[in-house]
Amino acid sequence: MELIRFQEQHVSLIDAYMLSEEQLRFTAHPSKSIPLCKAEPNRHAILGIENDRLVVYFALHEQEGVQPYSENPRAILLRTLSTDYHQLGKGYGKAALQQLPEFVQLQFPHVDEVVLAVNVANEFARKLYEKYGYKDTGRRVMGSKGILIVMSYPLEVYV
């Protein structure tokens, strides 16, 4: 799987991407996220592509996007991470989390921390984040779908 930035030629991949009702309890479909990424220069749509199929989607949000979750001006927020419903259980979410630190370091060399907020009811996702090195910061934020646990992953900076 390769992580790439969204471009207009990827629209058909977004249209074919499926999320279950259960997934939609905790995240948004890329079709809701991409217009926000287009409108806000500090929000970036990222695709996980395998064999010309979109298998993972997330957004990375700098500056104002991360401010409710971290006071670190060099942090970036991981938002709306999801795996296509038909690709669940194949390790793509894990692969995305494994590749994310290097991807961020290459694409955003000024960033020294990845921050995310996971719904307290989404225990599966929280455990997955912990497995890949994210630590609970102790901070809690009220989100649109309930209380969120703020987690952090420190990065090396090469700038």
Image (cartoon, rainbow, N blue to C red):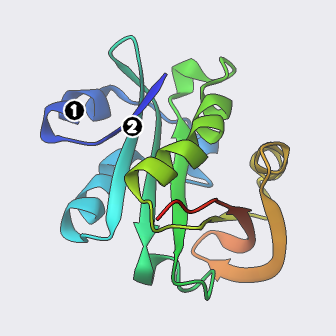
Q: Where is 80 relative to 140, above or below?
A: above
Question: Residue at the location (28% across, 61% down)?
Answer: 37
Residue 2 vs residue 40: left or right? right
Nearest the eye: 48 or 108: 108
Question: Residue at the location (42% across, 83% down)?
Answer: 64
The tally of labels here is: 2
- In the image, farthest residue toward the front: 159
Is disc 2 surrounded by few (<14), some (14 to 19) or many (20+) residues within 10 Å? many
Return the x and y of residue 138 as percentages of the image width and height.
85, 79
Q: Which amino acid does label 2 sit on?
A: Leu
Badge 2 element = strand
Which residue carries the number 1 mark? Answer: 10
Badge 1 element = helix
Q: How far apart are marks 1 and 2 (CA)?
A: 9 Å
Question: Residue at the location (61% across, 53% down)?
Answer: 25
Nearest the eye: 67 or 121: 67
For marks 1 and 2, the one nearer the N-term is 1
Return the x and y of residue 156 as percentages of the image width and height.
63, 59
Callout 1–callout 2 Cβ contact below 8 Å: yes
Disc number for residue 47:
2
- In the image, farthest residue toward the top: 51
Return the x and y of residue 21 as percentages of the image width and height.
57, 41
Residue 54 vs residue 69: left or right? left
Q: Which amino acid does label 1 sit on?
A: His
Is disc 1 surrounded by few (<14), some (14 to 19) or many (20+) residues within 10 Å? some
Return the x and y of residue 2 as percentages of the image width and height.
44, 26
Nearest the eye: 54 or 144: 54
Q: Where is 86 relative to 39, above or below?
A: above
Q: Where is 35 relative to 68, above or below?
A: above
Disc number for residue 93:
none
Question: Residue at the location (80% across, 50% down)?
Answer: 133
